[in-house]
Amino acid sequence: MKTYLAKPGEIERKFVLFDATDVPLGRLAVKIANSLRGKDRPAYTPHVDTGCYVVVVNAEKVLLTGSKSITKTYESYSGYRSGHKIVSVEEVRAKKPDRIIREAVWGMLPKGRLGRAQFAKLKVYAGAEHPHAAQNPEPVKF
């Protein structure tokens, strides 16, 4: 029996919908990363982007367990002196709630050209509405 390797032209993509309401961040990020990479499909090939488009709604309602809602911080550095910024998770939740999910998922994807292509298929929205209703995304239950 031969091993099947997917080719980029023969992959059919679908849209998947995740609702982040009261779901722990890590569990949600793992499911999203697996869908983006295509690891939940039988035609998974490590060096080919076989994943789905992922739509995440209610990003502002994602659950942080333990004391992470108090102690978790996000750091960025611009390269200049005094360009080091440290922001708490509550400030991020107030300004850009989609950043919490995006950074958690980016940490689980491969770095490089393939990982950037997979990450581009992630669409995160703070509220319950999204503009992808025409694609009929399949909801995923936890």
Image (cartoon, rainbow, N blue to C red):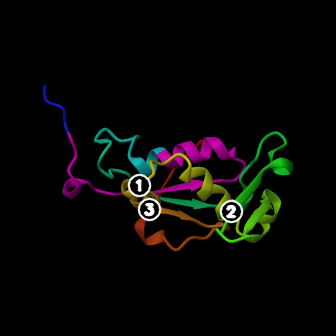
Tag 1 residue:
112
Could you tell me if the residues under marks 3 and 1 are in contact, i.e. CB atoms within 8 Å? no
At mark 2, the secondary structure is strand
Amino acid carrying label 1: it is Gly
Of residue 119 and residue 55, the one placed in the foreground of this image is: 119
Membership of 95 in magenta stretch: no
Mark earlier in primary sequence (3, 1): 1
Could you tell me if the residues under marks 1 and 2 are in contact, i.e. CB atoms within 8 Å? no
Looking at this view, name the residue that lies furthest to the front.
81
Tag 2 residue:
76
Count of numbered circles on the image: 3
Tag 3 residue:
121
* Residue drawn at 76 percent across, 47 percent down: 64
User: In the image, is residue 51 above or below residue 60?
Assistant: above
Amino acid carrying label 3: it is Lys
Give the residues in magenta.
5-33
x%, y% of residue 100? 67, 57
At mark 3, the secondary structure is loop
Of residue 2 and residue 81, the one placed in the foreground of this image is: 81
x%, y% of residue 118? 41, 56
x%, y% of residue 79? 64, 68
Looking at this view, name the residue that lies furthest to the bottom.
131
* Residue drawn at 41 percent across, 40 percent down: 40
Q: Which mark is residue 59?
A: none
Q: Sort mark 1 into few (<14), some (14-19) or many (20+) by Cα contacts within 10 Å.
A: few
User: In the image, is residue 45 above or below residue 122?
Assistant: above
Membership of 25 in magenta stretch: yes
Q: Cα distance, mark 3 to mark 1?
A: 15 Å
Q: Cα distance, mark 1 to mark 2?
A: 20 Å
